[in-house]
Image: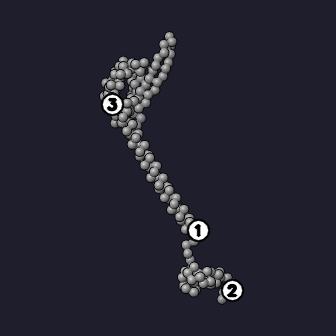
């Protein structure tokens, strides 16, 4: 008997025999004492759960992003006009002329301003409509600005 080591009393989970031993095996039935600790199991469970949640969220977010991108692309396409269409529209055209020329595209954005004339108090309604460039890059746009019903300026950027 070694005097320096006090062996712990162990309860065998297999045969329920108690033994004071430093051995990893039960001296009664020979089964190993060592078991996966329940704490370790719980931690492992939490990790697995977290991975599942993260994976689930990623899939969900990924799906939502794809949906948003699809919707965005559809909206971009619905508001796209070609360079030729842009070139064919002349300053001085009416809003109805422009609407007919760009059809079936609809403006992706409309801004309206009201300003008073400098020399008199005539109220000028200015509105600008924006279209995407067909086959263009992100941010490519055509702008048409109207004073009242008449196309005052157009630009592409
Ligand atoms: Zn045992």
Distance of label 2 from label 1 (alpha carbons): 33 Å
Closer to us: 87 or 99 = 99
Name which of mark 1 and mark 3 comes first in the sequence. 1
- Looking at the image, residue 84 sits to the left or right of residue 28; the answer is left
Mark 1 → mark 3, Cα distance in angstroms: 65 Å
The answer to whether any part of residue 66 appears in the image is yes
Query: Residue 15: percent from the left, percent from the top?
Result: 57, 83
Q: Earlier in the sequence, mark 2 or mark 1?
A: 2
Of the 4 image quadrants, the one containing the C terminus is top left
Total numbered circles: 3
Residue linked to disc 2 = 3
Element at label 3: loop
**Label 2 neighbour load within 10 Å: few <14, some 14-19, many 20+:** few
Residue at (50% x, 16% y) in the render: 116
**Ligand 1 closer than 8 Å to the CB at disc 2?**
no
Write the residue at 43% across / 25% down: 128
Q: Position of residue 103 (x, y in %)?
A: 33, 28
- How far across and down, in percent of the image, does residue 92 sit? 36, 18
Q: Which of the image's four quarters has the N terminus? A: bottom right
Q: Residue at coordinates 62% horizontally, 83% vertically from top-left?
A: 18
Asked which quadrant contains residue 77, the reply is: top left
Q: Residues within 10 Å of mark 1 (few under 14, many from 20)?
A: few
Q: Residues within 10 Å of mark 3 (few under 14, many from 20)?
A: few
Can see residue 137?
no
Q: Which mark is residue 104?
A: 3
Q: Which residue is mark 1?
A: 39
Give left or right: position of 29 versus 143. Answer: right
Q: Secondary structure at mark 2?
A: loop
Image point 44% across, 23% down: which residue?
127
């Amino acid at each position: 008997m070694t005097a320096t080591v006090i062996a712990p009393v162990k309860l065998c989970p297999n045969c329920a025999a108690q033994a004071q031993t430093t051995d990893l095996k039960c001296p009664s039935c020979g089964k190993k004492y060592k078991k996966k600790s329940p704490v370790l199991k719980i931690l492992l469970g939490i990790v697995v759960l977290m991975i599942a949640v993260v994976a689930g969220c990623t899939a969900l977010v990924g799906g939502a992003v794809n949906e948003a991108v699809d919707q965005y692309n559809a909206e971009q396409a619905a508001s796209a006009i070609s360079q030729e269409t842009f070139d064919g529209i002349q300053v001085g055209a009416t809003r109805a002329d422009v609407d007919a020329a760009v059809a079936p595209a609809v403006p992706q954005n409309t801004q309206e301003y009201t300003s008073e004339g400098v020399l008199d108090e005539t109220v000028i309604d200015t509105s600008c409509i924006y279209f995407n460039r067909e086959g263009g890059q992100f941010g490519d746009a055509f702008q048409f600005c109207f004073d009242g019903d008449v196309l005052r300026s157009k630009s592409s950027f």
